[in-house]
Image (cartoon, grey):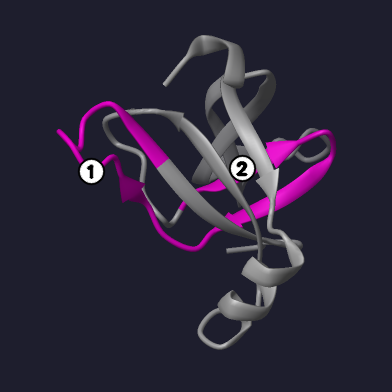
Amino acid sequence: MSAGRLRHRIDIQQRADVQDPVTGEMVPGWATVWAAVPCAIEPLSAREFIAAKATQSQVVARITLRFRDGLDASMRILHKGKIYNIAGLLPDKDSGLEYFTIPVSQGVNQG
């Protein structure tokens, strides 16, 4: 995968207890695991969207990024104020260790 395709920057978050800025108590929330991760974001074409609707009606785009150990489907992705929920992780077909293609749905993920 060429670096030129990875022109977007995302943050990847996981569920964690975070400190409430007002009360100081620990509350359930999201913590950033990786910030400014280079990736490619491709909205699904009309044809792909119709095909995906049969199995995963929520999938709106695919995100491709370099392999990251520890990345899993319970995490979420932030890009320009939008929240993307990870529908699955598809490793590259050769080694499985070069990159992931991630089908994502969009919406608020409170966990």
Q: Which residue is mark 2?
A: 77
User: Residue at 61% of width from left, 42% of height from top?
Assistant: 77
Q: Amino acid at mark 1?
A: Lys
**Quadrant of the image occupied by residue 101:** top left
Q: Residue furthest left?
A: 95
> Could one spot residue 90 in this view of the protein?
yes
Q: Quadrant of the C terminus?
A: bottom right
Q: Amino acid at mark 2?
A: Ile
First in sequence, mark 2 or 1: give its number: 2
Question: Mark 2: which secondary structure?
Answer: strand
Q: Residues within 10 Å of mark 2 (few under 14, many from 20)?
A: many
User: Residue at 21% of width from left, 30% of height from top?
Assistant: 97
Q: Is residue 58 rendered magenta in the image? A: no
Q: Residues within 10 Å of mark 1 (few under 14, many from 20)?
A: few
> Could one spot residue 36 in this view of the protein?
no
Rendered location of residue 40, percent (x, y) = 61, 31
Q: Quadrant of the N terminus?
A: top left
Number of marks in the image?
Answer: 2
Towards the viewer: 52 or 30: 52
Rendered location of residue 90, percent (x, y) = 34, 51
Q: Is residue 87 rendered magenta in the image? A: yes
Towards the viewer: 32 or 92: 92
Towards the viewer: 81 or 54: 54
Rendered location of residue 105, percent (x, y) = 65, 63
Rendered location of residue 68, percent (x, y) = 33, 28
**Quadrant of the image occupied by residue 20:** top right
Q: Which mark is residue 93?
A: 1
User: Residue at 84% of width from left, 39% of height from top?
Assistant: 81
- Please state if 23 lies on the left or on the right of 28 as rendered: right
Which residues, given as a range, are shown in magenta?
Answer: 75-100
**Quadrant of the image occupied by residue 80:** top right
User: Residue at 56% of width from left, 88% of height from top?
Assistant: 54
